[in-house]
Amino acid sequence: MGKGWLSPWALWDGSAQHLKSDDPTPDWRLPVRYGYIQPTENDDIYFRFVEHFNKILAAAADYVVSNEDLSAALPIVATIDAQPDVPRTITWAFDSHAQITAFTLTIAGTDAKGKSVTETFTAADGWSGETSNAFARITSITMSARTGTGAGDTLDIGIGSKLGLGNNIITASDVFKVDKSGAATNTADYTGVANVTAEGTYDTVDVSTGAAIVDGDSFTIHYFNRFYTQS
């Protein structure tokens, strides 16, 4: 099977010609179908992407919400103190739950691709956890159900160490290079499972596998996604 890099701009001219000529309702996503790319048998086409996460923040347990009072009338809509600095997973934890035996907590927002995402947690998930999706922006954090008064109980929402990619990956090996630099260090290769953990279902890269993120760390992630495969 052949495989090679192809810049998205390589499709621009053919797609533009298609727009100008033969279709009153063109689709920019169909350059293969219309013949502007001619893959041969058993060829796959990949786009190569490079994303920069510059001088990001360390993971912080209460960066988004700090000590939300859980005794208020339902639904409790948390006060969002800050948005994620870059697309990343969101952590949640009850500081205490002495007066709560069950709950429903929903985090809603958009991911690195601009897609709406929602995750809901209950007591079956425990009293702390982390989203699977990386959130670029949080729209709302809501406790819609609670068993118990919640008196004296509070909730923190924070930012995790898994960064969200703006395009799809299929397997961890699609992330083929990661560079890291610190506030006072030069850029160095950070590639490999000892340093990072890529995940293809939610298109995230955990950059804390080798060492925890320190405020001011920067990461450059090189990866490819599959644009076209032979059927």
Image (spheres, rainbow, N blue to C red):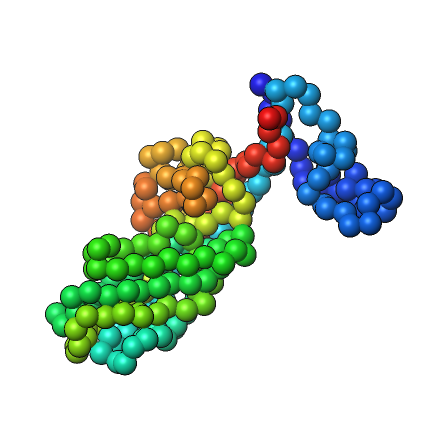
Indicate the position of residue 106 as horizontal and vertical percent values: 35, 64
Residue at the far left: name it: 98
Q: Specify whether 12 is left or right of 17.
A: left
- Pinpoint residue 192: horizontal percent, then vertical percent: 39, 33
Q: Residue at x 37, y 57 (%)?
A: 119
Residue 50 to residue 103: above or below: above
Which part of the image, by quadrant, shows the N terminus? top right
Residue at the image position 72 percent from the left and 46 percent from the top: 27
Q: Residue 110 location in percent, x, y?
A: 49, 59
- Position of the C terminus by quadrant: top right
Who's the residue at 77% across and 42% down the image? 15
Work out whether residue 98 can be spotted. yes
Viewer-closest of 154 and 124:
124
* Residue nearest the observer in this picture, 33 or 70: 33
Query: In this rendering, does residue 186 appear at all?
Result: no
Q: Is residue 177 above or below residue 147?
A: above
Which quadrant of the structure image shows residue 2? top right
Percent x, y of residue 102: 20, 65
Instruction: Using the image, determine if residue 99 lies above or below residue 228.
Output: below
Residue at position x 16%, y 73% in the image: 148
